Image: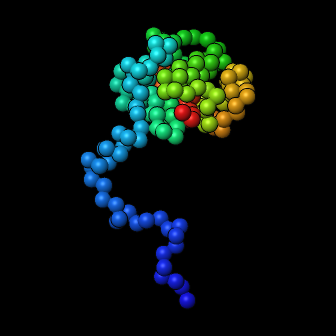
Amino acid sequence: MHSTKPSPHAIPSTKNFDLTAQTSKTLLSCVYNALSPAQLPTSSPPPHSNNCKNSQAISTPHAIYVSGPLPALAAGSLPAGTLGYKASLCIQNLSAILKTAGSDLSKVVKMTVFLTDMKNFAEMNAEYEKHFGGTKPARSCVAVAQLPKGVEVEMECVALP
């Protein structure tokens, strides 16, 4: 015979929660903080474009989510150079954003690397090892058809505060 007593581990039904739009806004404002461009250091490049609708980073009490900064200089220009140099710029830009959020590269737990050509993996990986040789965050590397502004590499991460 089956017991009708609910399990102590049961997830409560959503019908028990009445979150109005105002309550939801209040909860979200307590949970995360979007870093505005004014908060970012001058060494961090501007977002992907003037029409960018995303945040460069979202900081929560448990994690910092950094959107993929492009391999750009502080002024926003995309320099020529090797893929290793461009990967280094991506990592430097991630580092600058994490510093603003109160974290650093040693606290990165997940990286996602986007490459337009997997033939560049070894060169990207050599540069990556220089910055993440000791911490070894979980990482995915994804081949994509194209990236914003025609760049060859982009990286995003999740870090602990």
Question: Residue 24: where, in percent of width, then height?
Answer: 32, 48
At horizontal 26% and vertical 47% (from top left) the residue drawn is: 22
Residue 130 in the image: above or below residue 79: below
User: In what quadrant of the picture does the N terminus appear?
Assistant: bottom right
Question: Residue 15: where, in percent of width, then height?
Answer: 34, 65
At horizontal 50% and vertical 68% (from top left) the residue drawn is: 10
Q: Is residue 51 left or right of residue 150?
A: left
Question: Residue 63: where, in percent of width, then height?
Answer: 52, 38
At horizontal 27% and vertical 53% (from top left) the residue drawn is: 20
At horizontal 36% and vertical 21% (from top left) the residue drawn is: 50
Res. 91 image quadrant: top right
Who is closer to the viewer here, 53 or 59?
Answer: 59
Asked whether the viewer can see residue 117, the reply is no
Question: Residue 74: where, in percent of width, then height?
Answer: 48, 12
Q: Is residue 144 left or right of residue 125?
A: left
Who is closer to the viewer here, 92 or 127?
Answer: 92
User: In what quadrant of the picture does the C terminus appear?
Assistant: top right
Residue 97 in the image: above or below residue 144: above
Number of on-image labels: 0
Who is closer to the viewer here, 137 or 103?
Answer: 103
Q: Report the colour scheme.
A: rainbow
Asked whether the viewer can see residue 136, the reply is yes
